[in-house]
Image (cartoon, rainbow, N blue to C red):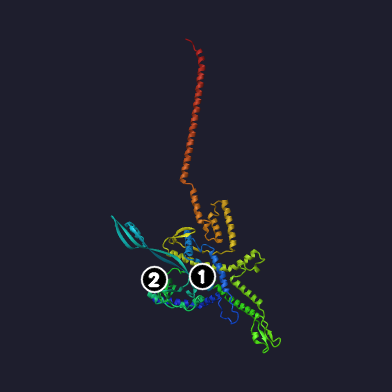
Amino acid sequence: MADMDELQFRRILQGEIESAVNYSDSEFSSERMDAMRYYLSEPFGNEVENRSQVVCSEVSDTINYMLPTLMKIFASSKEFCKFEPRGPEDVKAAEQATDLVNFSLHQDNNLFPIMNAWFKDALLFKVGAVKAYYQEDETVTTDEYEDLTAEELTLLLADPNVELVSQEVSAQGELETFSVEIKRKMKSGCVKVDNIPPEELIFSRRSTSLETCDFIAHRTQMTVSELVALGYDEELVSGFAGATDLDADQETQARFNELESGEDTDSADPSMREVLVTESYIRCDYDGDGIAELRRVVSLGDGREVLENEPFDKVPFALLSPILMPHRMVGRSVAELVMDLQLTKSSIMRQMLDNLYLTNNARVGAVDGQVNMSDLLSSRPGGVVRMRAPGMVQPLAVPQIGQTGFNMLEYVDQMRDQRTGFSKASAGLDPDRLQSTTASAVNATIQGAQLKVEMIARVFAETGCRQLAEVVLHLLQKHQDRERVVRIRGEFVAIDPRAWANGFDLTVEAGLGNGRDEEKAAMLMQVASKQEQLLQQLGPSNPVVKPSQYVNTLRKIAEMAGFKDTEQFFSSGEQIDQAMAQSAQQQKPDPAAEKAKAELALKREIEMEKLKMEREKMQAELELRRFEMQAELELRQQKLSFGGQVSDNLPRA
């Protein structure tokens, strides 16, 4: 099949954009505006003049209760995410990926305000969205060098980032020197994460998940100057500048309703006029092979002018929705759970206040013509009402609804607690409910109420936070083409994502678990005590617990106490393992030295045996010599003793 022509592709793109915009406007826009009005406690529109118009703040109270808890849960861990190796050869790469992704999120981006806006959008507007992209920057510096030799100049210009601006040659005797002016271009890049307003995110109506979404786009406004700086043609871009659909967007106007008045007009500076830009990610069979592939398309207006059209490998968005709905990409918001309760509670409060007003300024019945109406209508302390006869003015009874109203308010609060987990008891602030109660019962009450918030936190961790970590890792592997030195755990480490050949398993480090911080800290103290006992009894090389694991426990206790920089107290577990390995290596005997020592001992033993044998031989020889001498001496003595007798017996001549 032939490739899709540009006109056909543009029609498909325009159709997807138009369908997604209509779906967003019809399905979500009015609900988001209502949620914003409820959050700001604006009037409902059913107010009656001269009657109470109080508006309760259930939506704001509930979201502002959940948000700090969620931020604490995700901020309790120093690592936003952690990558696990899929094989033994990936252990080091997984550690580096974890370090670099967390460094990118915390250092290259100010993650706290990003997460705060991201979570709040999700709690209030059903969906919170962020977009990650790789931003490359180039800085140019000008330097001057004097009296360079030819070799030095050649070495300087060998740098591909150096550009020669001017050159002067001078002679010093037979040696030529060079004075030059150069420009040095330094390129750097990092992953950036931006929040996306909910009204600027559009997607196809049948989307069930971000991974299988056929069309999703970021529809925003950019100035002509910003687009020209990105390399687009100024004349082409200027043709689409002017009023856009987003200028009249009711959600945008509602967001800034408190801060501005009047209509926003285009700037008198042509370069600052705004253009509607749509960055779309669409699946279509552009190359005609019968398989739809993902493409990134940047267009002006509603897809009328395509600036970029390229194949792409991963959608760079990360979406959060606090209450998931099966088979839908966008679930429900927390605001939806309590908006009706805010209306109900406000109505009860208004009735109670109106009842209080009537009690203090009760209506009366007066006999016409028998009462001075001017006195009667002037309600003031100590005022006199003139009557022609007694009993001409009678107060009208006002039923007291105070107790009933308070009971209704309490019932509405109970409904809110059941839906959201937000209550005084869960925060440990209600003395009436928690007095004369065992510690375990109080703890069960608090933990039971926190389960709903922890459920939302788990949903956030396994959906949007996981997607963000995967996108950041993908961008680093794809775009970071050089080694980068970052500060990890107090040390400067060089990390090169190009060396990560395989994939990793991902876990998001949300601080979830049973019990409060005090209970977790107490449990960690018990673990540390047991680890210390095992190390003392079995030694540092035991197979149960390593010194690095013991130090990691101590570091975790310090983190829970609020100390983020635990390096000021303990070294990292990796540093301890390395130090112990070096110490063991130093203490390990040298095989060559041991062999020489053994050979020397054997030689000494042989020499000793030889000396012993020679000594024994000499002793044997001496003993034999002494025996021979003794025998010879005895023989001589015998000869001498027999010599006289023999001579006497000999015959004479």
Q: Which residue is mark 1?
A: 117
CB atoms at circles 2 and 1 under 8 Å apart?
no
Indicate the quadrant where residue 269 lies: bottom left
Indicate the quadrant where residue 310 lies: bottom left
Q: Nearer the viewer, residue 344 or 334?
A: 344
Image quadrant in which the N terminus is located: bottom left
Q: Amino acid at mark 1?
A: Ala
Q: Which residue extends farthest bottom?
A: 369
Q: Amino acid at mark 2?
A: Gly
Secondary structure under tag 2 reads: loop
Q: Nearer the viewer, residue 527 or 156?
A: 156
Residue at (47%, 46%) from the top-left corner?
Answer: 591
Residue 484 in the image: state x and y as whole percent: 43, 61
Residue 20 in the image: state x and y as whole percent: 47, 76
Q: Nearer the viewer, residue 633 or 537?
A: 537
Q: Kindly identify which numbered label has been placed on residue 231.
A: 2
